[in-house]
Image: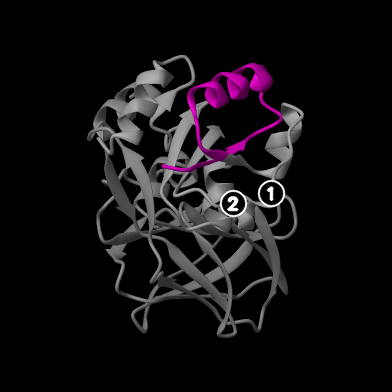
């Protein structure tokens, strides 16, 4: 099997970790910025040829990969929480690669959200799309429709539309429930709503979600914490279940272990 490697050059000791990983592999290519870490030649991320991508970093690195490629990703955590990754860089990497080469693993298929502005597709999120006031500490108005019916209207800092995968990320930090990652659901989460009754809503992922700004003329959309897009009061913002899920490599179902250990419940 040919592997592609994408590493976060900002992580401490990445040169040592990447050198160790390369030493275990026979057939691989490197993303161009990752290759610079060890003085090798690499390729742009969209030209990587591996059947599987090895992510060396945290969840941000993994999200970056999936924003550019739709191939199975094996995450090795070299960062902070690394909730989406499968093993730690301090684990037995040699045996992990033996399992990969012998195809002794499973693939977890995870749904994503497509974001549209005025019917134009602007991005796809594995975790969440955030609509937020464009001005610090200034309240914004939002109206939310689900499957064509108005479900909520409030003033606040913003609103998060998250996948089950994203339920353990930003959405969790503002009070959303944790969902099992393969559930066919989305979560709509008001952020610092100026209304006691504003609560997260869990809805079937088959339902389209529409959002409108009802306060100040501008707000900002943030897709998976990476891409920022300015939106205006007259814009129609829609969220739909993506037709292109992604696959993460798994050695077993350890979701609840991760919830307990990494999120410190």
Look at the image and give the residue range highlighted in magenta: 1-28
Q: In the image, which disc is placed on residue 235?
A: none
Q: In the image, which disc is placed on residue 43?
A: 1
SS at mark 1 in the image: loop
> How many numbered circles are shown?
2
Out of 31 and 186, give the one closest to the viewer: 31
Residue 199, located in which quarter of the rendered image? Answer: bottom left
Q: Specify the quadrant that holds the N terminus.
A: top left
Q: Say if the magenta span includes residue 2.
A: yes
User: Would you place residue 133 above or below residue 42 in this image?
Assistant: below
Is 215 on the left-hand or right-hand side of 163? right
Q: Is residue 264 visible?
A: no
Q: CA distance from mark 1 to mark 2?
A: 6 Å
- Badge 2 crowding class, 10 Å Cα cut-off, few under 14, some 14 to 19, many 20 or more, is many
Along the polypeptide, which appears first: circle 1 or circle 2?
1
Image spot of residue 259 (x, y percent): 32, 30
Which residue is tagged 2? 48
């Amino acid at each position: 099997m040919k592997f592609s490697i994408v590493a976060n050059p900002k992580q401490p000791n990445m040169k040592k970790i990447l050198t160790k990983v390369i030493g275990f592999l026979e057939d691989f290519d490197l993303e161009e910025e990752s290759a610079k870490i060890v003085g090798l030649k690499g390729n742009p991320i969209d030209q990587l040829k591996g059947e599987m991508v090895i992510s060396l970093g945290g969840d941000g690195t993994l999200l970056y990969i999936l924003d550019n490629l739709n191939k199975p990703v094996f995450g090795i955590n070299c960062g902070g929480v690394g909730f989406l990754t499968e093993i730690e860089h301090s684990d037995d990497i040699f045996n992990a690669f033996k399992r990969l080469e012998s195809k002794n693993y499973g693939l977890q298929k995870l749904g994503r959200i497509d974001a549209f502005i005025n019917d134009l597709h602007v991005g796809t999120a594995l975790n969440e799309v955030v609509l937020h006031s464009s001005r610090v500490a200034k309240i914004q108005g939002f109206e939310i429709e689900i499957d064509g019916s108005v479900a909520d209207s409030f003033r606040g800092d913003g609103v998060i539309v998250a996948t089950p995968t994203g339920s353990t990320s930003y959405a969790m930090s503002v009070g959303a429930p944790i969902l099992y990652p393969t559930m066919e659901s989305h979560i709509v989460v008001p952020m610092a709503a100026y209304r006691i009754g504003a609560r997260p809503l869990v809805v079937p992922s088959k339902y389209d979600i529409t959002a409108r700004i009802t306060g100040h003329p501008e707000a900002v959309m943030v897709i998976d914490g990476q891409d920022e897009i300015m939106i205006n009061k007259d814009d129609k913002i829609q969220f739909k279940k993506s037709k292109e899920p992604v696959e993460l490599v798994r050695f077993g179902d350890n979701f609840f272990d991760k919830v307990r250990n990494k999120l410190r419940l």
